[in-house]
Image: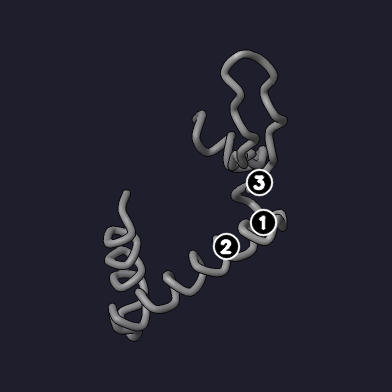
Amino acid sequence: MTKRDIIQRCHEKYPDFSKSLTEKVLNFILKEIALSLSRGEKVKLSGFGTWSVKKTGKKVGVKFKPSKKLLYYLNTPNLDAKINR
């Protein structure tokens, strides 16, 4: 599913809202999620899941690699049940 698919489905379910308004709302939500993660905050959407950013430790050895940040996602039990039907 793409962002365009989400916008289309929202428009079909709520025809009173224009596609451009739906796209603006979706872009706002996604931007807020990204900004929160970039500030190191945890993002939790009830019934869907939780995102968080964790920093990895520095690697020690001949080929030194600096630490980096990884994005973690955890499903909620409700979403797991819907996926695994």
Tag 1 and tag 3, C-beta contact below 8 Å = no
Type of amino acid under label 3: Val
- Indicate whether 12 appears above or below 76: below
For the residues labelled 2 and 1, say whether their Cβ atoms are less than 8 Å apart.
yes
First in sequence, mark 3 or 2: give its number.
2
Colour theme: one colour
Frontmost of labels 3 and 2 is 3
Three-letter code, disc 1: Val
Mark 1 or mark 3, which has the lower sequence index?
1
Which residue in the structure is indicated by mark 2? 33
Structural crowding at the residue carrying mark 2, measured as other residues with C-alpha within 10 Å and reported as few (<14), some (14–19) or many (≥20): some
- Judge from the rendering whether residue 30 lies leftward or rightward of residue 43; answer left or right: left
Tell whether 45 sits left or right of 27.
right
Q: Which residue was labeled with disc 3?
A: 53
Q: Tag 1 or tag 2, which sits nearer the N-term?
A: 2
- Spatial separation of the CA atoms under disc 3 and disc 2: 12 Å
What residue is rendered at 49% in x and 35% in y?
83
- Residue at 49 percent of width and 64 percent of height: 30
On residue 43, which mark appears? 1
* Occupied quadrant, residue 42: bottom right
Mark 1 Cα-neighbour bin, 10 Å: few <14, some 14–19, many ≥20: some
For label 3, the SS is: strand
Q: Residue at x 69, y 39 (%)?
A: 55
The residue sitting at 65% across, 35% down in the picture is 67
CB under 8 Å between discs 3 and 2? no
Q: Residue 75 in the image: state x and y as whole percent.
A: 62, 39
